[in-house]
Amino acid sequence: MIRSIFTVGGWTLLSRLTGFVRDIMMAAVLGAGPLADAFYIAFRLPNHFRSIFAEGAFNTAFIPAYARVKTVEGEAKARRFADGILTGVVLVQLALLAVALLATDWVVALLAPGLSDDPARFALTVDFTRITFPYLGLIAVVTLVGGVLNANDRFWAAAAASILLNVAMVGTLSVAGWFPTAGHAAAWGVLISGFLQLGLLVFDGERHGLGLRFGRPRLDADMRAFLIALGPAIIGSAGVQLALFADTIIASFLPEGAVAALFYADRINQLPIGVVGIAAGIVLLPEMSRRIAADDLAGARFAQSRAIELTLLLVLPFLAAALTIPEIIMRGLFMRGAFTAEAAAEAGATLAAYGVGLAPFVVVRAFMSPFYARGDTRTPVLATLGAAVVNIGLKILLMGSLAQVGLAFATSVGGWITVLALAVLARWRGYECGDAQLLRSLPRLVLIGVALAATLFGTAYVAGPWLAGLDHGRDEARLALCVAAGGVVYVLLVLALFGRRYLIGLLRGRPTAGHA
């Protein structure tokens, strides 16, 4: 499992790095003005629906169901099960796409009402949404094929697919002059990437004998169990996405640039969430599903504990950087072309607010896995919906005084509420979370985080005056010095507090008790 996490994390890291290249180009070409706001809203809309109906809900219901059918009834039955679901997914997505394309103006007016007073931005958002929305249907099929691959311990293709999104968008942005605006170029890049991602997943599935075919859905016991689990999963994912919808709706009432600041800060924040948290969740869910199906409860608990321990250990550098040098990150990565120092400051403050909730964001999937692996998708709904209510209420309270920074902070508060509620509900349901080794590791993790934050803050403070004489690359050099100093301190502290033997065992997939 640990090796698979590193595999998924490695491909996800490559995806995020190519994503930074894409975002740097987008920042230079689109900037943080009305054109950028229109594209980012249009880009968010299909991604919200994707997270509700595809990745967010579908995988949590499908992978445990598929793993259970395969373990208990064999591969042939599992293949027929997946084929029937493929037909249902395609029909649902075609219907959703038809509604969205026919009512795009209404959808944009509902989800970004603040644009109604700005006809130019509203019209651009509608145009971009019509181009990007078919991406949802393509990614829904990608999610299904990826779920089958993941359940059969094939992780690389699904993790690498998003690289093609970045490649396609960089390609269209590089020839933006061929399109009416740079926003149109970015939107067409999104749609093209959907076809590329689907092609990659289908190729890998066919290559390993896991390709899907259209089959007649059968409402047997396995399908009914899947649908029963899917309903609450959709509600739970909708609760999470409702808070993100609130970001889009509220930000549309804020001054120009607020949506773009949220986007760039979220892109940085999503790096550790994707590389560490989501990677661990992708691998942990089928692992726990198989162990629980085989009645290996101790093994399932051990797997969850090691996943939490690993994600917290790996996320510490990102957490310390987001809280201590957020503006330096934004200036070093994006401040060029149309992306100004003021935009970097706004995005940096937003990143710090997101950083408050980074720890729960990376472990939330590990806390949900004990429920989903047992086919229990109802209980996590209580946690996610409760957190969504608090999240949205805070956004409304803070939007006037803190603008988009308040929206990001409210999101972080919602993350903490979700994880704490899941821990309480797991204990109430009798699902043990964590073990003694994890509890022994927590104080050392806190110590590493505090020392790393102090190192980054001190390095940034000293490097500022020292690099003031540089005419070019001052911000990039300051960020590079912080990364170098923080990297050295992080490695030394991990070795000192956890020990070489522990780290070697972790990397080999046989973690042992850590020691100083």
Image (cartoon, rainbow, N blue to C red):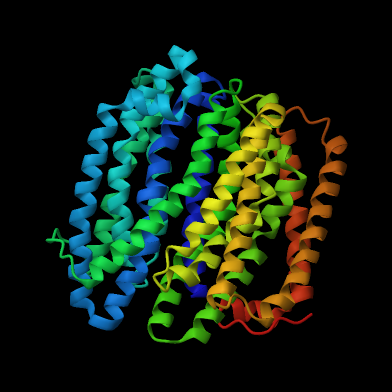
Residue farthest toward the left in the current orientation of the protein: 216
**Is 476 located above or below residue 144 in the figure?**
above
Instruction: State the image coordinates of residue 504 (x, y, percent, origin top left).
Output: 63, 79
Count of marks, rendered view? 0
Instruction: State the image coordinates of residue 206 (x, y, percent, origin top left).
Output: 21, 64
Q: Nearest the camera: 465 or 3?
A: 3
Report the residue at 25% width, 45% height from top: 93
| Left or right of 350, for residue 47 | left
Report the residue at 61% width, 81% height from top: 511
Instruction: State the image coordinates of residue 45 (x, y, percent, origin top left).
Output: 41, 36
Q: For the C terminus, which image quadrant?
A: bottom right
**Is 366 located above or below residue 406 in the figure?**
below
Q: Nearest the camera: 305 or 380?
A: 380
| Left or right of 426, for residue 238 | left
The reply to whether residue 155 is in sight is yes
**Is 482 located above or below residue 208 in the figure?**
above
Instruction: State the image coordinates of residue 289 (x, y, percent, origin top left).
Output: 41, 75
| Left or right of 107, for residue 405 | right
**Is 478 located above or below residue 316 in the figure?**
above
Q: Nearest the camera: 286 or 372?
A: 372
Within the image, what quadrant is residue 64 found in? Answer: bottom left
The reply to whether residue 509 is in sight is no
| Left or right of 248, for residue 492 | right
Within the image, what quadrant is residue 272 found in? Answer: bottom right
